[in-house]
Image (tube, rainbow, N blue to C red):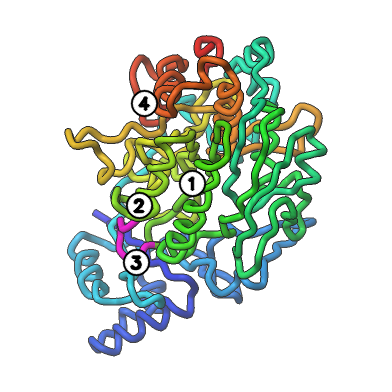
Amino acid sequence: MPVKLFLFEKNMATLNAALAKRADELGQEWLKLANLIEKYAHESFVPGDEYGFNNPSDMKEIDGKRLFEADDRPDLGFGVPLVLPDRETARNLLEVLEPVRSSEGGQIISCELTPMTAELAPEGQHWCAGRGQGYSFGNRAAARRLIGADRLKAKGLRGKGVHVFVVDQGLNQSYIERLGGNFATGVPWETDNKVKVPGEEKAPYLPVERGHGGMLVRSLIDLAPESKIYDFPLIPRRITGSDFFGLNATYAFWIIRLLCDTLAGPWVILNAWGLVDRFAETVRGGYSNNRNHWLNILIASIGTRHDVIFAAGNNGQFCGDPRATGYDLGPGRSIFGANGLPEVYSAGAVRTDGTWVGAASQGPGPSGFAVSTGIPVQKPDLAAPSWFNEDRDAALRSGGTSSAAAVLAGVVAALRSHPELGSMTPAALRQHLRGNSRPTNGPGWSRRTGTGIVNLTDVL
Protein backbone atom coordinates (compact mmCIF):
# COMPACT_ATOMS: atom_id res chain seq x y z
CA MET A 1 0.00 0.00 0.00
CA PRO A 2 1.52 3.39 -1.00
CA VAL A 3 2.60 5.75 1.78
CA LYS A 4 2.74 9.54 1.46
CA LEU A 5 5.67 11.59 2.78
CA PHE A 6 6.35 15.30 2.64
CA LEU A 7 9.69 17.16 2.49
CA PHE A 8 9.71 20.85 3.31
CA GLU A 9 12.33 23.59 3.62
CA LYS A 10 12.37 27.35 3.23
CA ASN A 11 13.45 27.12 -0.42
CA MET A 12 14.65 24.64 -3.03
CA ALA A 13 18.34 25.40 -2.59
CA THR A 14 18.42 24.68 1.16
CA LEU A 15 16.49 21.43 0.77
CA ASN A 16 18.77 20.35 -2.08
CA ALA A 17 21.91 21.14 -0.03
CA ALA A 18 20.67 19.30 3.06
CA LEU A 19 19.78 16.17 1.11
CA ALA A 20 23.04 16.25 -0.89
CA LYS A 21 25.07 16.42 2.33
CA ARG A 22 23.25 13.40 3.74
CA ALA A 23 23.62 11.49 0.46
CA ASP A 24 27.39 12.09 0.46
CA GLU A 25 27.68 11.03 4.11
CA LEU A 26 26.01 7.68 3.39
CA GLY A 27 27.21 7.27 -0.18
CA GLN A 28 23.62 6.90 -1.39
CA GLU A 29 22.94 8.93 -4.51
CA TRP A 30 19.21 8.13 -4.44
CA LEU A 31 18.80 10.52 -1.48
CA LYS A 32 19.59 13.59 -3.56
CA LEU A 33 16.64 15.84 -4.31
CA ALA A 34 16.60 15.38 -8.08
CA ASN A 35 16.67 11.59 -7.72
CA LEU A 36 13.90 11.56 -5.09
CA ILE A 37 11.73 13.74 -7.29
CA GLU A 38 12.34 11.61 -10.36
CA LYS A 39 11.58 8.35 -8.57
CA TYR A 40 8.93 9.19 -5.96
CA ALA A 41 7.35 12.63 -6.48
CA HIS A 42 3.57 12.71 -6.65
CA GLU A 43 2.33 12.93 -10.25
CA SER A 44 0.85 16.39 -9.64
CA PHE A 45 4.10 17.84 -8.27
CA VAL A 46 5.38 21.07 -9.88
CA PRO A 47 8.96 21.92 -8.80
CA GLY A 48 8.49 25.72 -8.75
CA ASP A 49 9.88 28.70 -10.60
CA GLU A 50 13.16 30.51 -10.82
CA TYR A 51 12.84 31.78 -7.25
CA GLY A 52 13.11 28.27 -5.84
CA PHE A 53 9.81 28.04 -3.99
CA ASN A 54 6.40 26.54 -4.73
CA ASN A 55 4.32 27.87 -1.87
CA PRO A 56 1.33 29.75 -3.35
CA SER A 57 0.25 31.47 -0.14
CA ASP A 58 1.99 34.79 -0.74
CA MET A 59 1.23 35.15 -4.44
CA LYS A 60 -0.46 38.31 -5.59
CA GLU A 61 -2.23 38.67 -8.92
CA ILE A 62 -2.56 42.05 -10.59
CA ASP A 63 -4.13 42.14 -14.06
CA GLY A 64 -3.51 38.43 -14.45
CA LYS A 65 0.21 38.65 -13.66
CA ARG A 66 1.82 37.01 -10.65
CA LEU A 67 3.73 39.38 -8.43
CA PHE A 68 6.00 38.67 -5.51
CA GLU A 69 7.47 40.83 -2.79
CA ALA A 70 11.23 40.95 -3.41
CA ASP A 71 12.10 40.29 0.22
CA ASP A 72 9.77 37.27 0.32
CA ARG A 73 11.46 35.34 -2.46
CA PRO A 74 14.21 33.56 -0.52
CA ASP A 75 12.04 31.78 2.08
CA LEU A 76 8.43 31.39 1.04
CA GLY A 77 8.81 27.64 1.33
CA PHE A 78 9.51 24.70 -0.94
CA GLY A 79 7.73 21.40 -0.50
CA VAL A 80 7.91 18.02 -2.25
CA PRO A 81 5.12 15.42 -1.81
CA LEU A 82 6.46 11.91 -2.19
CA VAL A 83 4.56 8.66 -2.67
CA LEU A 84 6.55 5.64 -1.51
CA PRO A 85 5.54 2.16 -2.71
CA ASP A 86 5.24 0.59 0.76
CA ARG A 87 5.73 1.13 4.49
CA GLU A 88 9.19 -0.41 4.54
CA THR A 89 10.52 2.03 1.93
CA ALA A 90 8.90 4.95 3.76
CA ARG A 91 10.31 3.88 7.13
CA ASN A 92 13.78 3.53 5.63
CA LEU A 93 13.64 7.05 4.20
CA LEU A 94 12.44 8.48 7.52
CA GLU A 95 15.28 6.79 9.38
CA VAL A 96 18.04 8.00 7.07
CA LEU A 97 16.69 11.57 7.05
CA GLU A 98 16.08 11.76 10.80
CA PRO A 99 19.52 13.33 11.58
CA VAL A 100 19.16 15.96 8.84
CA ARG A 101 18.89 19.50 10.19
CA SER A 102 17.20 22.45 8.56
CA SER A 103 18.94 25.59 7.41
CA GLU A 104 17.97 27.15 10.76
CA GLY A 105 20.07 24.54 12.53
CA GLY A 106 17.41 23.17 14.85
CA GLN A 107 14.48 21.35 13.38
CA ILE A 108 14.59 18.07 11.50
CA ILE A 109 13.81 18.20 7.80
CA SER A 110 10.05 18.07 7.55
CA CYS A 111 9.53 14.47 6.49
CA GLU A 112 6.57 12.76 8.14
CA LEU A 113 4.00 10.13 7.44
CA THR A 114 0.76 11.76 6.38
CA PRO A 115 -1.48 10.78 9.31
CA MET A 116 -4.87 11.22 7.66
CA THR A 117 -6.61 11.22 4.34
CA ALA A 118 -9.09 14.04 3.82
CA GLU A 119 -11.80 12.03 2.13
CA LEU A 120 -14.78 14.02 0.95
CA ALA A 121 -17.61 14.39 3.43
CA PRO A 122 -21.18 13.85 2.25
CA GLU A 123 -22.32 16.63 -0.06
CA GLY A 124 -23.77 19.55 1.86
CA GLN A 125 -21.77 18.84 5.02
CA HIS A 126 -19.19 21.49 4.27
CA TRP A 127 -18.37 24.25 1.78
CA CYS A 128 -15.07 25.29 0.22
CA ALA A 129 -14.51 28.69 -1.32
CA GLY A 130 -13.47 28.69 -4.95
CA ARG A 131 -14.04 25.04 -5.83
CA GLY A 132 -16.64 25.73 -8.47
CA GLN A 133 -18.81 27.36 -5.83
CA GLY A 134 -17.52 30.92 -5.93
CA TYR A 135 -15.38 32.69 -3.36
CA SER A 136 -18.18 34.05 -1.18
CA PHE A 137 -21.64 33.22 0.00
CA GLY A 138 -24.16 35.90 0.92
CA ASN A 139 -23.59 39.46 2.03
CA ARG A 140 -23.19 41.35 5.30
CA ALA A 141 -26.95 41.74 5.68
CA ALA A 142 -27.25 37.94 5.60
CA ALA A 143 -24.39 37.59 8.09
CA ARG A 144 -26.15 40.01 10.45
CA ARG A 145 -29.41 38.07 10.17
CA LEU A 146 -27.65 34.81 10.97
CA ILE A 147 -26.43 36.06 14.36
CA GLY A 148 -29.39 38.35 15.13
CA ALA A 149 -27.25 41.50 15.06
CA ASP A 150 -30.27 43.82 14.96
CA ARG A 151 -30.84 42.95 18.61
CA LEU A 152 -27.74 45.00 19.45
CA LYS A 153 -29.20 48.11 17.83
CA ALA A 154 -32.57 47.52 19.47
CA LYS A 155 -30.89 47.43 22.87
CA GLY A 156 -28.72 50.45 22.12
CA LEU A 157 -25.52 48.39 22.40
CA ARG A 158 -22.92 50.15 20.24
CA GLY A 159 -19.71 49.47 22.16
CA LYS A 160 -19.60 52.84 23.90
CA GLY A 161 -16.71 53.03 26.37
CA VAL A 162 -15.15 49.79 25.09
CA HIS A 163 -11.55 49.60 23.83
CA VAL A 164 -10.60 47.11 21.11
CA PHE A 165 -6.96 46.19 20.47
CA VAL A 166 -6.45 44.77 16.97
CA VAL A 167 -3.25 42.70 16.91
CA ASP A 168 -2.65 42.23 13.20
CA GLN A 169 -0.55 43.47 10.27
CA GLY A 170 -1.62 47.07 10.76
CA LEU A 171 -4.67 49.34 10.34
CA ASN A 172 -5.35 52.47 8.35
CA GLN A 173 -6.75 55.39 10.35
CA SER A 174 -8.32 57.20 7.41
CA TYR A 175 -10.19 54.04 6.36
CA ILE A 176 -11.48 53.49 9.90
CA GLU A 177 -12.76 57.06 10.06
CA ARG A 178 -14.28 56.76 6.59
CA LEU A 179 -16.31 53.84 7.90
CA GLY A 180 -17.49 55.94 10.84
CA GLY A 181 -15.23 54.24 13.40
CA ASN A 182 -13.15 55.72 16.18
CA PHE A 183 -9.40 55.29 15.82
CA ALA A 184 -7.79 55.86 19.22
CA THR A 185 -4.06 55.20 18.93
CA GLY A 186 -1.73 52.24 18.99
CA VAL A 187 1.80 51.00 19.52
CA PRO A 188 4.52 51.31 16.85
CA TRP A 189 6.33 48.02 16.22
CA GLU A 190 9.07 46.67 14.00
CA THR A 191 7.62 44.06 11.65
CA ASP A 192 8.98 42.72 8.35
CA ASN A 193 12.19 44.73 8.89
CA LYS A 194 10.47 48.08 9.19
CA VAL A 195 8.84 50.09 11.95
CA LYS A 196 5.10 50.28 11.41
CA VAL A 197 3.30 53.35 12.71
CA PRO A 198 -0.22 52.75 14.07
CA GLY A 199 -2.90 53.85 11.65
CA GLU A 200 -0.60 54.13 8.65
CA GLU A 201 -0.81 50.66 7.14
CA LYS A 202 -0.55 50.55 3.35
CA ALA A 203 0.02 47.27 1.50
CA PRO A 204 1.80 47.35 -1.89
CA TYR A 205 -0.53 46.87 -4.88
CA LEU A 206 -3.50 46.58 -2.52
CA PRO A 207 -6.10 49.23 -1.59
CA VAL A 208 -6.49 49.59 2.18
CA GLU A 209 -10.08 48.37 2.09
CA ARG A 210 -8.93 45.04 0.63
CA GLY A 211 -6.21 44.48 3.21
CA HIS A 212 -6.52 42.05 6.12
CA GLY A 213 -6.82 44.84 8.68
CA GLY A 214 -9.45 46.59 6.59
CA MET A 215 -11.53 43.42 6.59
CA LEU A 216 -11.36 43.16 10.38
CA VAL A 217 -12.37 46.75 11.14
CA ARG A 218 -15.42 46.56 8.86
CA SER A 219 -17.00 43.96 11.14
CA LEU A 220 -15.89 45.72 14.32
CA ILE A 221 -17.39 49.03 13.24
CA ASP A 222 -20.55 47.42 11.92
CA LEU A 223 -21.31 45.73 15.25
CA ALA A 224 -19.73 48.11 17.78
CA PRO A 225 -19.48 51.50 16.02
CA GLU A 226 -18.79 53.52 19.17
CA SER A 227 -15.91 51.35 20.41
CA LYS A 228 -12.39 52.79 20.30
CA ILE A 229 -9.96 50.93 18.05
CA TYR A 230 -6.26 50.53 18.87
CA ASP A 231 -3.66 49.30 16.37
CA PHE A 232 -0.82 46.91 17.24
CA PRO A 233 0.97 45.99 13.95
CA LEU A 234 2.76 42.94 15.39
CA ILE A 235 2.05 40.25 12.78
CA PRO A 236 4.41 39.76 9.80
CA ARG A 237 3.17 38.69 6.39
CA ARG A 238 4.13 35.17 7.33
CA ILE A 239 5.21 33.63 10.65
CA THR A 240 8.27 31.68 9.50
CA GLY A 241 10.12 31.08 12.78
CA SER A 242 8.00 30.54 15.87
CA ASP A 243 10.94 30.99 18.26
CA PHE A 244 11.75 34.54 17.19
CA PHE A 245 8.11 35.43 16.68
CA GLY A 246 7.21 34.00 20.10
CA LEU A 247 9.83 36.15 21.82
CA ASN A 248 8.79 39.24 19.84
CA ALA A 249 5.11 38.59 20.57
CA THR A 250 5.84 38.13 24.28
CA TYR A 251 7.27 41.66 24.49
CA ALA A 252 4.24 42.94 22.59
CA PHE A 253 1.69 41.25 24.82
CA TRP A 254 3.46 42.51 27.95
CA ILE A 255 2.78 46.01 26.62
CA ILE A 256 -0.81 45.09 25.80
CA ARG A 257 -1.31 43.70 29.29
CA LEU A 258 0.16 46.82 30.86
CA LEU A 259 -2.07 49.13 28.82
CA CYS A 260 -5.21 47.08 29.37
CA ASP A 261 -4.64 46.82 33.11
CA THR A 262 -3.81 50.51 33.40
CA LEU A 263 -6.43 52.27 31.28
CA ALA A 264 -10.03 52.12 32.52
CA GLY A 265 -12.80 50.53 30.54
CA PRO A 266 -13.54 47.07 29.11
CA TRP A 267 -10.90 45.74 26.69
CA VAL A 268 -11.33 43.34 23.80
CA ILE A 269 -8.19 41.99 22.10
CA LEU A 270 -8.72 40.67 18.56
CA ASN A 271 -6.15 38.20 17.17
CA ALA A 272 -6.86 37.00 13.63
CA TRP A 273 -3.52 35.19 13.33
CA GLY A 274 -1.96 31.86 14.23
CA LEU A 275 0.63 29.21 13.45
CA VAL A 276 -0.08 27.50 10.12
CA ASP A 277 2.42 24.64 10.16
CA ARG A 278 4.42 23.26 13.05
CA PHE A 279 7.52 22.87 10.92
CA ALA A 280 8.15 26.50 11.91
CA GLU A 281 8.98 25.30 15.41
CA THR A 282 12.54 24.39 16.32
CA VAL A 283 11.11 21.89 18.80
CA ARG A 284 7.86 20.38 17.60
CA GLY A 285 5.13 21.44 20.05
CA GLY A 286 7.39 23.90 21.88
CA TYR A 287 4.78 26.62 21.46
CA SER A 288 1.90 24.91 19.69
CA ASN A 289 1.32 22.23 22.35
CA ASN A 290 3.02 23.66 25.44
CA ARG A 291 0.77 25.29 28.03
CA ASN A 292 3.89 26.61 29.81
CA HIS A 293 5.39 28.45 26.85
CA TRP A 294 5.98 32.06 27.92
CA LEU A 295 3.64 33.48 25.26
CA ASN A 296 0.82 31.09 26.17
CA ILE A 297 1.21 31.87 29.87
CA LEU A 298 1.06 35.61 29.20
CA ILE A 299 -1.94 35.50 26.87
CA ALA A 300 -3.79 33.21 29.28
CA SER A 301 -3.21 35.70 32.09
CA ILE A 302 -4.62 38.51 29.94
CA GLY A 303 -7.60 36.31 29.09
CA THR A 304 -8.59 36.02 32.74
CA ARG A 305 -8.96 39.83 32.93
CA HIS A 306 -10.07 40.84 29.45
CA ASP A 307 -11.86 39.35 26.43
CA VAL A 308 -9.26 37.81 24.12
CA ILE A 309 -10.60 36.57 20.77
CA PHE A 310 -8.61 34.34 18.41
CA ALA A 311 -9.41 32.89 15.00
CA ALA A 312 -9.45 29.10 15.25
CA GLY A 313 -7.32 28.89 12.10
CA ASN A 314 -7.74 27.83 8.47
CA ASN A 315 -6.26 24.32 8.59
CA GLY A 316 -9.55 22.53 8.05
CA GLN A 317 -9.78 19.00 6.74
CA PHE A 318 -11.21 19.74 3.31
CA CYS A 319 -9.72 22.93 1.91
CA GLY A 320 -7.16 24.11 4.44
CA ASP A 321 -4.28 26.53 4.08
CA PRO A 322 -1.92 25.35 1.28
CA ARG A 323 1.08 26.03 3.52
CA ALA A 324 0.04 23.28 5.93
CA THR A 325 1.10 19.66 5.54
CA GLY A 326 -1.22 16.72 6.13
CA TYR A 327 0.17 16.47 9.63
CA ASP A 328 -1.33 19.85 10.49
CA LEU A 329 -4.80 19.53 8.97
CA GLY A 330 -8.14 18.34 10.24
CA PRO A 331 -9.73 17.23 13.52
CA GLY A 332 -7.49 17.60 16.55
CA ARG A 333 -4.51 18.65 14.42
CA SER A 334 -5.28 22.19 13.34
CA ILE A 335 -5.66 24.53 16.35
CA PHE A 336 -2.27 25.46 17.79
CA GLY A 337 -0.82 27.55 20.60
CA ALA A 338 -2.65 30.54 22.02
CA ASN A 339 -5.56 30.00 19.60
CA GLY A 340 -6.51 26.96 21.70
CA LEU A 341 -6.10 28.33 25.24
CA PRO A 342 -9.06 27.72 27.59
CA GLU A 343 -8.88 31.39 28.64
CA VAL A 344 -9.60 32.82 25.17
CA TYR A 345 -12.42 32.73 22.65
CA SER A 346 -11.65 30.63 19.58
CA ALA A 347 -13.84 31.35 16.54
CA GLY A 348 -14.81 28.82 13.89
CA ALA A 349 -16.42 29.81 10.59
CA VAL A 350 -19.72 29.17 8.81
CA ARG A 351 -21.38 30.61 5.71
CA THR A 352 -24.17 33.14 6.10
CA ASP A 353 -26.69 30.26 5.92
CA GLY A 354 -24.93 28.37 8.73
CA THR A 355 -23.11 25.76 6.62
CA TRP A 356 -19.68 24.94 8.01
CA VAL A 357 -16.68 26.19 5.99
CA GLY A 358 -14.40 23.23 5.31
CA ALA A 359 -11.24 25.35 5.64
CA ALA A 360 -11.94 26.22 9.30
CA SER A 361 -9.72 24.45 11.83
CA GLN A 362 -11.31 21.65 13.83
CA GLY A 363 -10.99 20.84 17.49
CA PRO A 364 -10.32 19.76 20.04
CA GLY A 365 -7.57 22.13 21.09
CA PRO A 366 -3.92 21.19 21.72
CA SER A 367 -3.57 17.97 23.71
CA GLY A 368 -1.01 19.62 25.99
CA PHE A 369 -3.61 22.18 27.06
CA ALA A 370 -6.02 19.58 28.47
CA VAL A 371 -7.24 20.22 32.00
CA SER A 372 -5.96 18.07 34.86
CA THR A 373 -8.75 15.53 34.33
CA GLY A 374 -7.40 14.86 30.84
CA ILE A 375 -10.50 16.19 29.08
CA PRO A 376 -9.54 17.80 25.72
CA VAL A 377 -9.96 21.57 25.41
CA GLN A 378 -13.21 22.38 23.62
CA LYS A 379 -12.02 24.64 20.82
CA PRO A 380 -13.44 26.31 18.82
CA ASP A 381 -15.85 27.89 21.31
CA LEU A 382 -18.32 29.28 18.79
CA ALA A 383 -18.79 29.86 15.09
CA ALA A 384 -19.51 33.13 13.31
CA PRO A 385 -20.23 34.03 9.66
CA SER A 386 -17.46 34.35 7.08
CA TRP A 387 -16.89 34.44 3.30
CA PHE A 388 -19.48 37.14 2.69
CA ASN A 389 -19.42 40.34 0.61
CA GLU A 390 -20.31 43.87 1.59
CA ASP A 391 -23.87 44.92 0.77
CA ARG A 392 -22.87 47.82 -1.49
CA ASP A 393 -19.55 46.50 -2.79
CA ALA A 394 -19.39 42.90 -3.93
CA ALA A 395 -15.63 43.23 -4.48
CA LEU A 396 -15.03 43.50 -0.72
CA ARG A 397 -15.02 40.06 0.83
CA SER A 398 -14.58 38.95 4.43
CA GLY A 399 -13.11 35.46 4.55
CA GLY A 400 -11.48 32.79 6.69
CA THR A 401 -11.76 32.38 10.44
CA SER A 402 -10.21 35.87 10.59
CA SER A 403 -13.58 37.23 9.48
CA ALA A 404 -15.40 35.05 12.03
CA ALA A 405 -13.08 36.29 14.80
CA ALA A 406 -13.73 39.92 13.83
CA VAL A 407 -17.50 39.34 13.93
CA LEU A 408 -17.19 37.69 17.34
CA ALA A 409 -14.98 40.52 18.61
CA GLY A 410 -17.55 43.06 17.40
CA VAL A 411 -20.30 41.16 19.21
CA VAL A 412 -18.30 41.00 22.45
CA ALA A 413 -17.38 44.70 22.24
CA ALA A 414 -21.07 45.60 21.80
CA LEU A 415 -22.14 43.34 24.68
CA ARG A 416 -19.56 44.95 26.96
CA SER A 417 -21.58 48.17 26.74
CA HIS A 418 -24.59 46.35 28.28
CA PRO A 419 -25.15 47.35 31.94
CA GLU A 420 -25.31 43.73 33.17
CA LEU A 421 -23.34 41.71 30.62
CA GLY A 422 -20.60 44.33 30.73
CA SER A 423 -19.79 43.48 34.34
CA MET A 424 -19.35 39.74 33.74
CA THR A 425 -15.91 38.17 33.95
CA PRO A 426 -14.45 37.12 30.58
CA ALA A 427 -15.04 33.46 31.45
CA ALA A 428 -18.67 34.12 32.43
CA LEU A 429 -19.47 36.10 29.29
CA ARG A 430 -17.78 33.46 27.12
CA GLN A 431 -19.88 30.76 28.77
CA HIS A 432 -23.04 32.87 28.34
CA LEU A 433 -22.36 33.16 24.61
CA ARG A 434 -21.57 29.45 24.34
CA GLY A 435 -24.65 28.43 26.32
CA ASN A 436 -26.98 30.53 24.16
CA SER A 437 -25.50 29.71 20.75
CA ARG A 438 -27.43 27.97 17.96
CA PRO A 439 -26.23 24.34 17.65
CA THR A 440 -25.37 23.07 14.17
CA ASN A 441 -24.75 19.38 14.89
CA GLY A 442 -27.17 18.57 17.68
CA PRO A 443 -26.73 19.47 21.36
CA GLY A 444 -23.31 19.78 22.91
CA TRP A 445 -19.94 20.80 21.55
CA SER A 446 -18.85 20.11 17.96
CA ARG A 447 -15.31 19.90 16.54
CA ARG A 448 -16.35 22.12 13.66
CA THR A 449 -18.50 24.86 15.18
CA GLY A 450 -18.03 24.58 18.93
CA THR A 451 -21.29 24.92 20.83
CA GLY A 452 -22.85 26.56 17.77
CA ILE A 453 -23.35 29.83 15.91
CA VAL A 454 -23.43 33.16 17.78
CA ASN A 455 -27.08 33.81 18.61
CA LEU A 456 -27.75 37.30 19.95
CA THR A 457 -31.50 36.73 20.12
CA ASP A 458 -31.04 34.27 22.99
CA VAL A 459 -27.95 35.96 24.44
CA LEU A 460 -29.96 39.15 25.00
Quadrant (top left, top right, bottom left, bottom right) of the N terminus: bottom left
Residue range highlighted in magenta: 281-287
Judge from the rendering whether residue 64 lies leftward or rightward of residue 320; answer left or right. Answer: right
Q: Position of residue 344 (x, y in %)?
A: 42, 36
Query: Disc 3 or 2, which lies upstream in sequence?
Result: 3
Query: Disc 4 or 1, which lies upstream in sequence?
Result: 1
Q: Secondary structure at mark 4?
A: loop
Give the residue displayed 44% in from the left and 45% down from the top. Answer: 315
> How far is mark 3 from mark 4, CA to CA?
32 Å
Q: Which mark is residue 446?
A: 4
Give the residue displayed 55% in from the left and 35% down from the top. Answer: 267
* Residue designated by label 2: 288
* Residues packed near mark 1 inside 10 Å, few (<14), some (14 to 19) or many (20 plus): some
Count the labels in the image. Answer: 4
> How far is mark 3 from mark 1, CA to CA?
27 Å
* Residue designated by label 3: 282
The type of residue carrying mark 1 is Arg
Quick check: is 188 in the magenta stretch?
no
The type of residue carrying mark 4 is Ser
Q: Secondary structure at mark 3?
A: loop
* Residue designated by label 1: 257
The type of residue carrying mark 3 is Thr
Query: Disc 3 or 1, which lies upstream in sequence?
Result: 1
Q: Is residue 386 visible from the viewing direction of this image?
A: no
Up-down relation of residue 250 to residue 309 (above or below): below
